[in-house]
Amino acid sequence: MMNKKSVLVSGGAGYIGSHTAVELIAAGYDVVVADNLSNSDMSGIEGVRAITGVDVPFINVDCCDKQAFAQVFEQYDFDSVIHFAAFKAVGESVADPMKYYCNNLLSFINVIDLMREYGRHNIVFSSSATVYGEAEELPVTEATERKPATSAYGNTKQMCEDILRDATAAYPEIKGIALRYFNPIGAHPSALIGELPRGVPQNLVPYITQTAAGVRECLSIFGDDYPTEDGSCLRDYIDIVDLAKAHVAAINRMVEGKNQCGYEIFNVGTGRAVSVFELVKTFERVNNLKLNYKVAPRRAGDVVAVWADTTLANKELGWRAERSLEQTLQSAWEWEKRVRNIE
Ligand code: NAD
Ligand code: UDP
């Protein structure tokens, strides 16, 4: 009998995985982290240990190396897996698609194969709102049709969703939930863990916090001529701790046998559309600072607007986003200050 209160977190040294590990432990789960530190370092794990007071086991392993990864299944008796391990830079995936297909698909295929071989039952997969592309109906529900991916990264998310759908249909002992994240931002209120992008940040909030910290000179707002109220794009920014809690809810649902079918999909967002200008202004207001920014041309590939209808997650997972944009943007700045040793 596998331990129902134990979860393998692959990619758990990273941004979302480390916050999820904290919330799993708070909810009474044992956590094992497997990560090859290809886009992270041990500070995430150390932060999780400091916040929880639990000496979380960490295994440095590449999930694409099936033999090595199998050792984790040999050694630990978790019944559930949350699979975060993937590369996530959209632009890089267009320039080097094979890097993304190899890592993101193979690591996921290995997880499912090993779950079958070792008799493990529940899996949560990190999907993304990117699967909706430029949606015809807003907000998007889980039934909104996916659009053909415009990057290899986005394509790996769609392909992994399909792999999970087919695997759970064919092997009923395996249950799966795909969580489609909207835009995760912010940091743990302790400021002991947060987002640590390597090089120049591609995402809005880390670019903002690094600009405020003086690491970047000026934020470029990509486009002010979109067909929105203030001309900038609309997104659904979800607090990282709220997002982490959605994973706990998904695991609880499968452990308790409440999932209605073998494969389910949930949007994980706030349900609220926020423009780039609104986000920048809120960041300035709550942190009492002025940000150096300018309007720049549109960024290729950006959709105008996407935000979530969260009815399904609210109802079925019993989960909803609780933290305000203000709290989240304060936490993002507290984290950046800590990383940069700013008082
Ligand atoms: P992250 O890069 O901080 O974390 C991913 C972790 O996986 C890293 O620690 C990395 O070292 C590890 N990893 C990558 N390939 C691995 C491999 N082959 N074997 C072992 N470890 C490996 O990224 P994140 O923001 O925490 O994202 C986690 C997941 O959520 C990813 O699948 C990502 O695509 C997905 N996602 C992220 C966002 C976002 O905006 N951050 C949005 C939607 C979906
Ligand atoms: N954005 C911006 N400047 C930046 C980074 C992002 O104006 O330096 C905008 C981007 O055009 C989009 C929004 O911020 O409208 C969110 O972008 P991000 O890359 O964080 O997430 P995405 O929704 O594109 O995955």
Image (tube, helix red, strand yellow):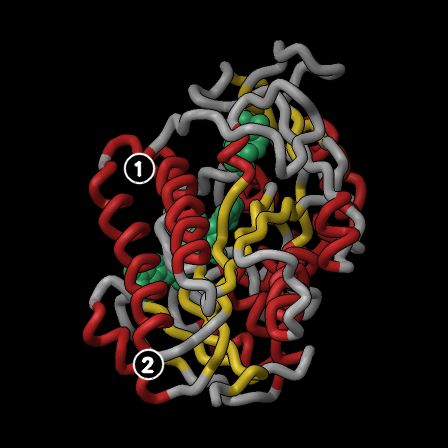
277 sits to left or right of 42? right
Q: Position of residue 278 (x, y in %)?
A: 74, 30
Say if disc 1 is inside 8 Å of ligand 1.
no
Q: Residue at x 68, y 79 (%)?
A: 26
Crowding around mark 2 (Cα neighbors within 10 Å: few <14, some 14 to 19, many 20+) is: many
The mark tally for this picture is: 2
Q: Residue at x 68, y 52 (%)?
A: 239
Crowding around mark 1 (Cα neighbors within 10 Å: few <14, some 14 to 19, many 20+) is: many
Kindly identify the amino acid type of the residue bearing the numbered disc 2.
Val
Q: Nearer the viewer, mark 2 or mark 1?
A: 2
Q: Nearer the viewer, residue 330 or 124?
A: 124
Q: Which mark is residue 41?
A: none
Q: Nearer the viewer, residue 140 or 186?
A: 140
Whether 71 is drawn above or below 295: the answer is below
Q: Which mark is residue 72?
A: 2
Which residue is disc 1 drawn over?
Answer: 93
Whether 231 is drawn above or below 124: the answer is above
113 sits to left or right of 326? left
Tag 2's secondary structure? helix
Q: CA distance from mark 2 to mark 1?
A: 28 Å
Tag 1's secondary structure? helix
